[in-house]
Amino acid sequence: MTTKRQENALKTREKLKSTAEKLLKTNGFNALCVEDITKAAGVAKGTFYVYFKHKEDIVAEICRGYFKQIEEQIEQMKTHDISEKLAVYFDSFMRAVMLYGINICREWIRSSIDPKTAPDNTDMTKWQYDVEMLKNILTNAVKNNELKKDTPVELLTHMIISELYGMMTCWCMSDGEFEPTEWTKKFADMPLKAVLDKYLI
């Protein structure tokens, strides 16, 4: 049974997260600071550190929540085929990348490429999280008879996630000079359909 103290702690934590997310969307990652978060949330600065070590930690958790929403959205698309589900996943993935900004995106890539040298405040599980989410989408498609039983889920997962991370990396390298969602749409309309065609039922 949850105590009143635990309930209050959970409310405070969620308030910090919702406040940080608003500031993040309004001002961007670089301008986000712990003092602004706690001030806007109406709590003492020290309260932040009861729940999070760095601003990066709260941002990582916010991002996780967004990607969880994407996963739930796809699970509800019961009348749509796997191509449509993946198109939604790609578009939502890139919109999340753009929403949280190029600097967070660079941290994700840096920690994925060289996790041993990533700072302690970096979300080093982003790659694994994305791989597992995509793998689950494809696995469910096999279970639901959208894809054949012999579909190489592991191979397709890594092929597709590599494409997404390639787009993300190029976006960072160009300093955000192009629209990533245009690439994901073209990928979903052309190469992805060709790859999936062999395994569609």
Image (cartoon, rainbow, N blue to C red):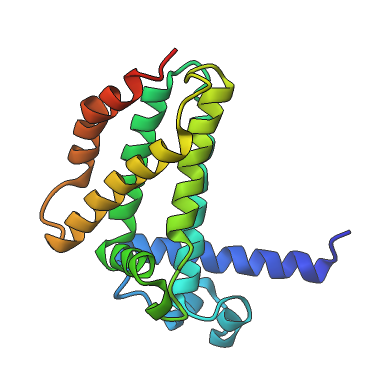
Q: Residue furthest top?
A: 201
Query: Observer-nearest residue: 26 or 110?
Result: 110
Tell me where residue 69 appears, x and y as whole percent.
50, 43
* Residue 76 in sight from this viewpoint: no
Which residue corresponds to the image point at 36% horizontal and 74% vertical from the top-left?
32
Choose top left, top right, bottom left or bottom right for residue 51. Answer: bottom right
The structure residue drawn at horizontal position 48% and vertical position 18%, both measured from the top left corner, is 146
In the image, residue 15 above or below residue 52: above
Compared with residue 12, is residue 156 higher up or lower down, i.e. above or below? above
Question: Could you tell whether 37 is left or right of 43 in the image?
Answer: left
Query: For the view shown, which residue lies furthest in the right direction?
Result: 1
Q: Provide residue 104's location: percent of width, then percent of height.
A: 33, 66
What's the residue at 38%, 69% (across, down)?
111
| Residue depicted at 57% across the width and 65% down the height | 15
Q: Quadrant of the C terminus?
A: top left
Give the quarter of the image for residue 55. bottom left
In front here: 2 or 185? 185
- Residue 87 seen from this side: yes
Image quarter (top left, top right, bottom left or bottom right) of the N terminus: bottom right
Left or right, 128 with respect to 178, comes to right
**Residue 189: percent from left, percent from top:** 23, 25
Q: Position of residue 174 (x, y in %)?
A: 11, 60
Q: In the rendered image of this protein, does residue 129 appear above or below residue 23?
A: above
